[in-house]
Structures are given as C-alpha cells and as structure tokens.
Image (cartoon, helix red, strand yellow):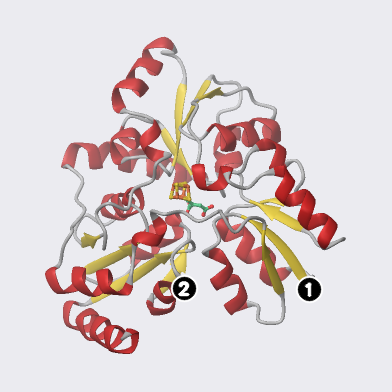
C-alpha cells in the first residue's frame, strides 16, 4: 500500500534527518513525497544548503555524484544503483583525454550529464539552462563540448561559436520526432510548442521556445496560454499540471520516457532509507577537480 509506504518513508526521513530530492523527470508519486523537485543543478545546490545529514537523490547516478561533490560531509543515497544516464556514459575518460591531446589549446566544457571523472577532466561544467552563457564566456577560444551533440549544436547556433562536438545524445529525447510535432500542430492549431535542447535539431527548429526543464516550468507559470505542447521527458507533466491546474499540457511524444528515471519507486526509497545504501561517493582527488569545474560554472552564472 502506497499510503503505508509513504508513512514509513516519512518516519525514516525524520529519524535519519534526511532530505528527499526529486528530479523533474521522476514518477509523480516520487515528486509528491520529495522535499524539493527541480533540475539537477537546482537539486544539488539545494542539497548543499540544507542541514540534513542524508540526501536521498531520486534521479540518476551523475546527479547524485554532483550532490556528493558539492556536499562531501553528507551521505548521498541513490535508491537504485542501476539508475544511470546512457548519454553520460557515451564518453569515457580515455576518450576525453585523447580529444584533449588532439586539441591541447581547447577549453573543455562538459554538460552536467557526465560522470564525476569527466567533470574532473573538464575546465568548466554547464547545464541546459546556462550552456549559452557559459560558452559565451569563452568566445574566441577553441571549445570541446561533451557529451551531448544536440545541446552543443543548439548552443553553437545560438552563439555563433564553432564547437568541437562529441557524438553523444539522449535516446529518450530522440524519441520525439518532427512528425510528432507536425501532427500535434495540426491537431491543436495555434498551441505553442516548447522543447528541451536535448531534442533533435529538426524538432528544435519547429518549436516556439527551447528551454531546460526549469525553464519549461517557469514558462508554464509565467506565460499566458491555455494549452502547451511539451517536448521533453514526460515526467515533467506531473509537476506542470500540479502547479498550473487550469492549463493543459500535451506531451510531444508519449514515448519520451527515460527508463532510468523511472527506476526509482516508493519501495526503493523506503529501502534505501532503512539500509542507508546504496551510497554514492566520489574519491577525494576526483571530487576536488570536479568541484573546480562546477565552481567555474557557478562563477559565470
Ligand atoms: O539538468 C537537468 O536536470 C537535466 C538533465 C535536464 C534539464 O533541462 O533540467
Ligand atoms: Fe540521461 Fe536522457 Fe534519461 Fe536525462 S532523460 S537521464 S539525458 S537518458
């Protein structure tokens, strides 16, 4: 019974002085029990600010790592250790080292969707909400951007900067095709379309706005519309509908479901609070270097 599980989670949370953070792509029932719902950076910053001893990170591996990098004195738990990000895994440390050897004068910018090791080997990190700003700060420099080529292409078009792109991409966002948008535009004439920059360029070209998940949530509450077509992982619809009950949100594709984000269940949250594992830790030397890349980003935004 969900009701009993939720009570158990609440009690364990109090007992361990824990905070539960949920990404915008998590299941609705997970978002509902979380102390805070947001994008990966908002969540990690929130984690660093709380006086909780334990952070239950309902998201994927790199997000829990980011929280551990910013809050080394806290215990960071990931309810399902298998919840990874296939895009983050599309670049290895060796591959990045090779690319750096090939372009020794380049600045390395990594998307937050990357492992702690990749962050440690980068000069600066960025998220989908500040990528344009971060890249502009290095105007005139040669830039290697890893691992998302679609976000890279978007930033390149927005800033006019040429980037050395890595061929990574998010399989979940690439489920959204131009034919989906075309069909919905025909079905709902005049309804605005917002998409995430991880979407394919031909989908992005059909959108009225290209926004991070945080940006989509702000757009939804601030802009005047009755219906909105949303091109990102469908978990965000729960939050959008909850925060804007009088507005209608239409998924660009019902297939845009991230299997890794959906691994987190109430049962797994309760179990990880009972056992205080799986814990995510980052070795000291990697942590120090990765924090430098995150700090460099925070200084720019
Ligand atoms: O940074 C995040 O949380 C991700 C993965 C997406 C977004 O746009 O918020
Ligand atoms: Fe990774 Fe895509 Fe899932 Fe986000 S939605 S965690 S980028 S696979």
Q: Relative to 182, does residue 191 appear above or below in the rendering?
A: below
The correct choice, above or below, for 163 with respect to 39 in the image is above
Q: Quadrant of residue 244?
A: bottom right
Residue 227 screen position, x and y as percent: 76, 69
Percent across and percent down for residue 206 are 77, 45
For the residue pair 216 and 247, the one nearer the viewer reads as: 247
144 on left or right of 163? left
Q: Is residue 278 left or right of residue 187?
A: left
Which of the two discs, 1 and 2, sits closer to the camera?
A: 2
Q: Which residue is mark 1?
A: 226
Q: CA distance from mark 1 to mark 2?
A: 22 Å
The quadrant of the rendering that contains the N terminus is bottom left
Q: Quadrant of residue 16?
A: bottom left
* Image height of 275 relative to 208, above or below: below
Q: Is residue 56 something that shows in the picture?
A: yes
Of 191 and 153, the residue lying toward us: 191
Q: Residue furthest left?
A: 275
**Earlier residue among tags 1 and 2:** 2
Which residue corresponds to the image point at 72% horizontal and 76% vertical from the top-left? 247
Which residue has dot 2 on it? 28
- Residue 137 shows up from this direction: no
């Amino acid at each position: 019974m969900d009701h009993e599980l939720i009570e158990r989670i609440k009690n364990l949370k109090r007992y361990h002085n824990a905070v539960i953070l949920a990404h915008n792509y998590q299941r609705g029932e997970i978002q509902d029990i979380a102390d805070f719902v947001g994008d990966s950076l908002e969540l990690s910053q929130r984690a660093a600010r709380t006086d909780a001893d334990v952070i239950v990170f309902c998201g994927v591996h790199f997000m829990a790592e980011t929280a551990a990098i910013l809050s080394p004195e806290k215990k960071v738990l990931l309810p399902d250790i298998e919840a990874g990000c296939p895009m983050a895994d599309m670049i290895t440390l060796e591959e990045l080292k090779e690319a750096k050897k090939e372009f020794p004068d380049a600045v390395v910018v990594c998307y937050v969707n990357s492992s702690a090791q990749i962050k440690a080997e980068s000069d600066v990190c960025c998220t989908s909400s500040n990528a344009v700003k971060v890249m502009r700060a290095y105007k005139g420099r040669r830039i290697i951007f890893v691992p998302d080529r679609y976000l890279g292409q978007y930033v390149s078009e927005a800033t006019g900067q040429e980037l050395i792109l890595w061929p990574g991409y998010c399989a979940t966002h690439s489920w959204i095709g131009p034919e989906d948008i075309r069909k919905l535009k025909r079905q709902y004439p005049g309804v605005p379309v917002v998409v995430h920059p991880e979407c394919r360029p031909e989908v992005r070209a059909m959108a009225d706005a290209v926004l991070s998940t945080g940006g989509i949530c702000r757009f939804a509450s601030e802009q005047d519309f009755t219906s909105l077509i949303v091109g990102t992982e469908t978990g965000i619809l729960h939050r959008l509908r909850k925060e804007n009950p009088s507005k209608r949100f239409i998924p660009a594709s019902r297939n845009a479901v991230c299997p890794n984000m959906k691994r987190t269940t109430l049962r797994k949250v309760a179990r990880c609070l009972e056992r205080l594992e799986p814990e995510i830790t980052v070795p000291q030397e990697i942590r120090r270097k990765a924090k430098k890349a995150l700090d460099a980003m925070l200084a720019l935004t």
